[in-house]
C-alpha cells in the first residue's frame, strides 16, 4: 500500500482522516482538497480513513453521552456529537446543521413474539429534519462543500436525497441542482426540493439514467455531487449505528436490516460497525441485512449467487420508488460490508412490502413504502431460517410516512377508510353503522 502523504491530515475539530481509494487492492491516497469521489487509478469510490487509537477511544462513550441534547454546551446535533468518528472541519468553518439525528429506537414486542425473536426494534431515521436518513449524511456533505468553497451542490435522486440536499444547501446559502427521473418522484419529495429553492430538472426514466447524466455534467458545470458516491455522506450516515448501539446500552443486535437502493446506507452502516470494532467499542458485529424490492434487486441476486460482479437491472420496477434503482453505485463497498459482517440479503415483492407497511402502521409506526421493505425482508429471512429463532433484530426505517401519501390512498382496502355522511348527528351515526 502507498504511504499517506506526510502532513496531509487536516487540522481542526473532528478526527484526523484522509481520503483513500475504497478498494483495498488499490489503496491510492487521494487529495481531500480536490473534492474527488473516485480513484483516478482504478475508478473505485473514495472513502475517508480515520486514524483510530483504541486507547483514546475508551473515553468516547462517556463523551458522547455528555453531549446528548440539553447537556452539550456546544449544542451539537445528533450527528456532530460523534465528532471523534467524523472527518475534521477546518477551523473557522461552521457545520451546516438542521439538528439532525437523535432519532427514536422503538421496541416492537408484539411483532417480536409473532416472529419468535428475543427482541425487535425499529430505528426510525424518517424522523429527521426533512423526513429521511439522508439528512445524517447531508449535514457532513454540505459542510464539506462549504469547506471546499463550492457554490453549487447537485444530485440525482429518487426524491429523498433531493429534499435533503435542497434543505442543507438553503441552510448553507448554496445553490442546489436536482436531476430526477420523470414522473417517478413522489409529490411530497418534489415539493420539498422546490420549497427549499432547488432547480429541479426532470431527465430520463430511471434514477440510474439521471445519475449517469449528472456524473458526466459535474465536471463540466463545476457541480459538487451530493449523491452517496460522495464519501462525506457516508460519514454522517454511519452515525446511525453508533446512536442505536448507545440506545441499546452497547449490546449489539444480532441483525441490522435495512432497504437497499444505491447501497450507500449499507456501506455507511458497515463502515460505522467496522470502525467501532476497530476502536474496541464492540466485539460482536451485527450481521447487516439488505432488502431489495424484487423488481430492483441486482445486489440480492449477486449475493445469492455468490457472484463477484453485479449484473445491473436495466428496467428496475417497484412501487417503492425510493429503491427503484438498477445500477447501485456502491455495490463493491456494500459487498465488503456484508462480507465483514457475515451479512445476508432478501428480495421482496411489492405485495409483501405493502403487508409489512400495514403491520407497522397497525402498531402506530408510520414509514414510507421503501422503509417497510426491512420488515418484509425480515419475515422472509425468518421463514428461510437465515435469521434464527431468538435473535435480536433492529430494522432501519429510512423515510417518513408523509413522503408518499398517494401510496396510502392506493392501498385503503381493508382499512376503515373514508365515508361520506350528511352533516347531521343522524347522518354521521348512520355512516358509522357496521363499524361501531
Ligand atoms: C426511503 C429510502 N429508503 C432506502 C433508500 C436506499 O438507500 P441507499 O440508496 O443508500 O441504498 C433510499 C434511497 O433513496 C430511500 O430514500
Ligand atoms: Zn483505486
Image: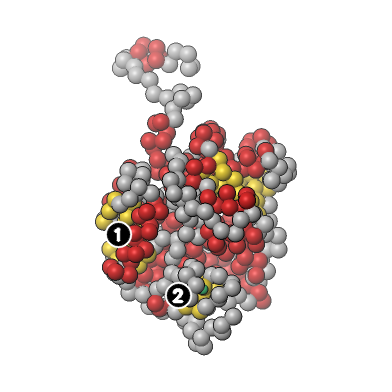
Judging depth in this view, the residue of 247 and 185 nearest the camera is 185
Where 28 falls versus 286 (above or below)?
below
> Which residue corresponds to the image point at 55% horizontal and 63% vertical from the top-left?
333
Q: Residue extending furthest bottom?
A: 6
The numbered disc on residue 286 is: none
Mark 2 surroundings: few (<14), some (14-19) or many (≥20) residues within 10 A: few
- Disc 2 within 8 angstroms of ligand 2 (CB): yes
Q: Secondary structure at mark 2?
A: loop
Judging depth in this view, the residue of 148 and 158 nearest the camera is 158
Where 405 falls versus 148 (above or below)?
above
Residue at image mark 2 = 40
* Mark closer to the observer (2, 1): 2
Q: Secondary structure at mark 1?
A: strand
x and y, in percent, of residue 433 in the image: 44, 13
Q: Report whether 406 appears left or right of 374.
A: left
x and y, in percent, of residue 31 in the image: 44, 79
Judging depth in this view, the residue of 410 and 173 nearest the camera is 410
Residue at image mark 1 = 177
Q: Quadrant of the N terminus?
A: bottom right
> Which residue corresponds to the image point at 63% horizontal and 77% vertical from the top-left?
53
Mark 1 surroundings: few (<14), some (14-19) or many (≥20) residues within 10 A: many
| Precedes in sequence: disc 2 or disc 1 | 2
x and y, in percent, of residue 118 in the image: 71, 43
Q: Is residue 291 visible?
A: yes
Q: Report whether 261 appears left or right of 179.
A: right
Amino acid at each position: 500500500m502507498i504511504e499517506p502523504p506526510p502532513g496531509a491530515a487536516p487540522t481542526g475539530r473532528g478526527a484526523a482522516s484522509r481520503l483513500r481509494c475504497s478498494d483495498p487492492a488499490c489503496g491510492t491516497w487521494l487529495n481531500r482538497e480536490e473534492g474527488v469521489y473516485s480513484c483516478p487509478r482504478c475508478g473505485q469510490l473514495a472513502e475517508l480513513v480515520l486514524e483510530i487509537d483504541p486507547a483514546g477511544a475508551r473515553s468516547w462513550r462517556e463523551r458522547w453521552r455528555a453531549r446528548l441534547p440539553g447537556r452539550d454546551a456546544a449544542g451539537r446535533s445528533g450527528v456532530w456529537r460523534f465528532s471523534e468518528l467524523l472527518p475534521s472541519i477546518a477551523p473557522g468553518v461552521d457545520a451546516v446543521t438542521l439538528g439532525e439525528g437523535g432519532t427514536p429506537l422503538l421496541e416492537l414486542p408484539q411483532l417480536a413474539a409473532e416472529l419468535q425473536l428475543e427482541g425487535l426494534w425499529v430505528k426510525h431515521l424518517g424522523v429527521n429534519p426533512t423526513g429521511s436518513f439522508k439528512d445524517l449524511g447531508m449535514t457532513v456533505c454540505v459542510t464539506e462543500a462549504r469547506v471546499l468553497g463550492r457554490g453549487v451542490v447537485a444530485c440525482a435522486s429518487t426524491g429523498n436525497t433531493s429534499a435533503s440536499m435542497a434543505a442543507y444547501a438553503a441552510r448553507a446559502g448554496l445553490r442546489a441542482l436536482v436531476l430526477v427521473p420523470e414522473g417517478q418522484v413522489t409529490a411530497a419529495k418534489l415539493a420539498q426540493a422546490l420549497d427549499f429553492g432547488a432547480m429541479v430538472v426532470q431527465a430520463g426514466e430511471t434514477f440510474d439514467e439521471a445519475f449517469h447524466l449528472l456524473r458526466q455534467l459535474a465536471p463540466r458545470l463545476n457541480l459538487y455531487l451530493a449523491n452517496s458516491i460522495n464519501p462525506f455522506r457516508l460519514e454522517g450516515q454511519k452515525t446511525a449505528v453508533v446512536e442505536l448501539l448507545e440506545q441499546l446500552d452497547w449490546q449489539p443486535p444480532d441483525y441490522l436490516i435495512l432497504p437497499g437502493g444505491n447501497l450507500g446506507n449499507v456501506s455507511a452502516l458497515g463502515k460505522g460497525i467496522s470502525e467501532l470494532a476497530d476502536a474496541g467499542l464492540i466485539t460482536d458485529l451485527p450481521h447487516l441485512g439488505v432488502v431489495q424490492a424484487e423488481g430492483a434487486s441486482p445486489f440480492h441476486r449477486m449475493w445469492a449467487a455468490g457472484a463477484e460482479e453485479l449484473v445491473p437491472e436495466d428496467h428496475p420496477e417497484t412501487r417503492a420508488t425510493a429503491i427503484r434503482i438498477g445500477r447501485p453505485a456502491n455495490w463493491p463497498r456494500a459487498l465488503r460490508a456484508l462480507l465483514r459482517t457475515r451479512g445476508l440479503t432478501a428480495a421482496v415483492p411489492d405485495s409483501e412490502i405493502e403487508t409489512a407497511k400495514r403491520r407497522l402502521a397497525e402498531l402506530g409506526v408510520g414509514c414510507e413504502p421503501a422503509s417497510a421493505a426491512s420488515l418484509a425482508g425480515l419475515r422472509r429471512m425468518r421463514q428461510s431460517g437465515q435469521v434464527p429463532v431468538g435473535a435480536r433484530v433492529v430494522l432501519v426505517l429510512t423515510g417518513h410516512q408523509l413522503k408518499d401519501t398517494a401510496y396510502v390512498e392506493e392501498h385503503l382496502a381493508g382499512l376503515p377508510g373514508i365515508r361520506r355522511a350528511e352533516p347531521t348527528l343522524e347522518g354521521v351515526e348512520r355512516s358509522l353503522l357496521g363499524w361501531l
